[in-house]
Image (cartoon, rainbow, N blue to C red):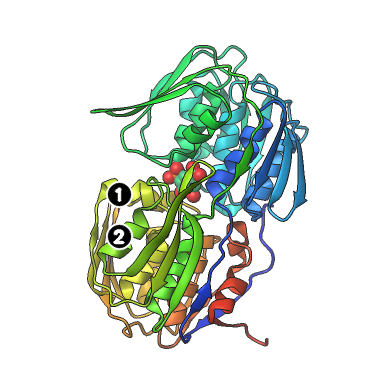
Amino acid sequence: MSSHAAADRVTALKSGPLRGEAVTPGDKSVSHRALIFGALSIGETRVTGLLEGEDVLNTAAAMRSFGADVERTGSGAWRIRGVGVGGFSEPENVIDCGNSGTGVRLIMGAMATTPIAATFTGDASLRGRPMGRVTEPLAEFGAQACGRSGGRLPLTLMGAANPGPVEHRLRVASAQVKSAMLLAGLNAPGVTTIIEPEPTRDHTERMLRGFGAEVSVEETKDGRVIRLVGQPELRAQTVAAPRDPSSAAFPVCAALIVEGSDVLAPSICLNPTRAGLYHTLREMGADLTFENLREEGGEPVADLRARFSALKGVETPPDRAPSMIDEYPVLAVVAAFAEGPTVMRGVAELRVKESDRIDAMARALEACGVKVQEDADTLIVHGRGADGVAGGATVASRLDHRIAMANLVMGLAARDGVTVDDASPIATSFPGFEALMTGLGARFGREGA
Ligand code: S3P
């Protein structure tokens, strides 16, 4: 989908206590990967708990375009009959990844070592995002990209006919780039080596192993060295997607800032490469507990209980950024309701997400009466305490689901609520967000409704 539905202007109103269970959707990262790995395997992969948001549905459609048989069999239940490593056929039409950077970058990697051409596009947000970070490393395998200036979409990628194995050190701490390179390495003979100076989410490595590839990970003084033996036969699997910690962040953070709240979010993926927000919240003094810690589908999982809390500002170090990269917008909101400044360092990557998230949150917070400071890779929010945020503003979501949800969470605790000019992007990652929050006691309004 290249454009969202008509703008959906929503106001979050100051709400009473939020209480109950927040059953949040399946993990977006795992969902994209389950579809792609299923498509690259021999046999029938079954996925449960798949996130049925627009981003992931676009990846499902893309996998069909490359020749896989992808079918929905029930709510969150999907079946994929794959074509095997190197078995992708050339799509007949342009691949539209909608809003999804993860979708487009991983799929480019997955086809980069097969001798076919594919043209990729997306919505206005995705067309503005840098693709050179993926196409340049993929060129080391012999893949050729031709896109708009700055390497932006629409872009055509010609897969390499005779790929060789590659040794590549990541220039940005990005799981998307790492995953694109590993997916490309699948169809290159020999051992592909990827070195990541800072650890990023490791779902791809886990899934590679789960589908039968030979992968080793070595922690060295130069970073994590990941070695993949190319041209394995991936075997179809059953994948149970855990619930997304990045989506659970919204009801959990809302509970922390709305007085009297007590919310339980069951079965949330707490993979250490994803859990940075939750550790930060505890440092801020959040009454947040991890109950029932266990393993599900190869990922650590817990039930999160969050209660309204008196919070204090903290400093988040740059090396924590990859483990909470999608959570800074909502952390910025929580920080506004804490006492004292919260300093978020090493967050330059936020500038190239679905929107420039530093700018989007800085402008929204200022409009709601919160003082902020920013530079290229830092955001400082000067907290105003539990009842200190005025709100009363209309803020822009900028085609960014997480900016929309973070600002609606702010409105639930701000004195005069917050209006988001367009909440429709939320459907990319969290369909049912508003219904779930309403079920907990959140109040939303629409003009004329
Ligand atoms: C993702 C990686 C992150 C994250 C995105 C999902 C993934 O992007 O922001 O929402 O599934 O690999 P980067 O790896 O580019 O930081």
Residue 320 numbered tag: 1
- Please name the residue shown 43% across and 77% down the image: 262
Please state which of residues 224 and 289 is positioned toward the viewer in this rendering: 289
Q: Which residue is mark 2?
A: 280
Q: Quadrant of residue 326?
A: bottom left
Where does the image place residue 199, in percent across and percent down from the top left?
Answer: 35, 38
Label 1 crowd (10 A; few <14 / some 14-19 / many >=20)? many
User: Mark 2 against mark 1, which lies toward the viewer?
Assistant: 2
Where does the image place residue 22, in percent across and percent down from the top left?
Answer: 53, 68
Q: Is residue 358 left or right of residue 49?
A: left
Give the structural element (helix, strand or loop) at label 1. Answer: helix
Give the structural element (helix, strand or loop) at label 2. Answer: helix
Residue 390 numbered tag: none
Please state which of residues 256 and 177 is positioned toward the viewer in this rendering: 256
Please state which of residues 223 and 216 is positioned toward the viewer in this rendering: 216
Type of amino acid under label 1: Arg
